[in-house]
Amino acid sequence: METFSWKVRPGMRAEREPRVQTIRFGDGYEQRRADGLNVLQSRYAIMLSGPHATMQEVDDFLMRHCGIRAFMWLPPGQTAPAVFICRRWSTVKLARRTEINGEFEQIPA
């Protein structure tokens, strides 16, 4: 499995939404439980900016994985890498650099 090793820009948004099953009763009471073994997976809105050649390598990496093949990535501030996929990303070519924005979705290993 390949590793995404490029540095993302600061200010990355992280989203977490635990999967929970809920049963609601008529008196307002509800019972909740975890929905599966891997309940908490994260999504990160990543941003990269750099020279055209370097950003082309990033774009090639994402196209090679095409939202299907998983890759390893160590999110900033985390201590251990996790397994991710990237279903969507966009590129903007400017005069001296290229910007890439995408969403990394953590998946069960």
Image (cartoon, grey):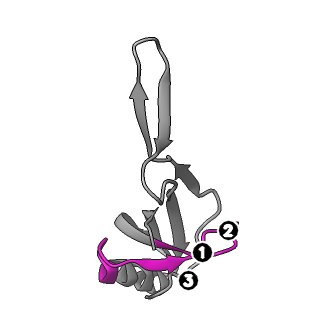
Cα separation, mark 3 vs mark 1, equals 8 Å
Q: Position of residue 3 (x, y in %)?
A: 50, 85
What separation in Å lies between label 2 and label 3 (alpha carbons)?
14 Å
Residue at the spot 43% in from the left edge and 66% down from the top edge:
107
Q: In the rendered structure, does residue 34 fall within the stretch colored magenta? A: no
- State the residue at coordinates (51%, 59%): 44
Give the Cα distance between marks 2 and 1: 7 Å
Three-letter code for the amino acid on which mark 3 is drawn:
Ser
Q: Left or right: where does residue 102 sit relative to residue 7? A: left
Is residue 51 rendered to the left or right of residue 60?
right
Q: Please, what is the three-letter code of the amino acid marked with disc 2?
A: Gln
Tag 3's secondary structure? loop
What residue type is disc 1 on?
Answer: Leu
Give the residue pinned by disc 2. Answer: 78
Q: Position of residue 31 (x, y in %)?
A: 48, 30
7 vs 37, nearest the viewer: 37
Query: Which of 65 and 49 lies nearest the eye of the viewer?
Result: 65
Callout 1: few (<14), some (14-19), or many (20+) C-alpha neighbours within 10 Å?
Answer: some
Name the residue rendered at 63%, 56% in the picture.
11
Q: Secondary structure at mark 2?
A: loop
Residue identifier under label 1? 74
Mark 2 or mark 3: name the one nearer the start of the chain.
Answer: 3
Question: Mark 1 and mark 2 in contact (Cβ < 8 Å)?
Answer: yes
Image coords of residue 38 (percent x, y): 48, 60
Q: Quadrant of the C terminus?
A: bottom left
The magenta segment: 63-83
Up the image or down, 33 lies above or below 11; here it is above
Instruction: Determine which residue is flagged by label 3.
Output: 5
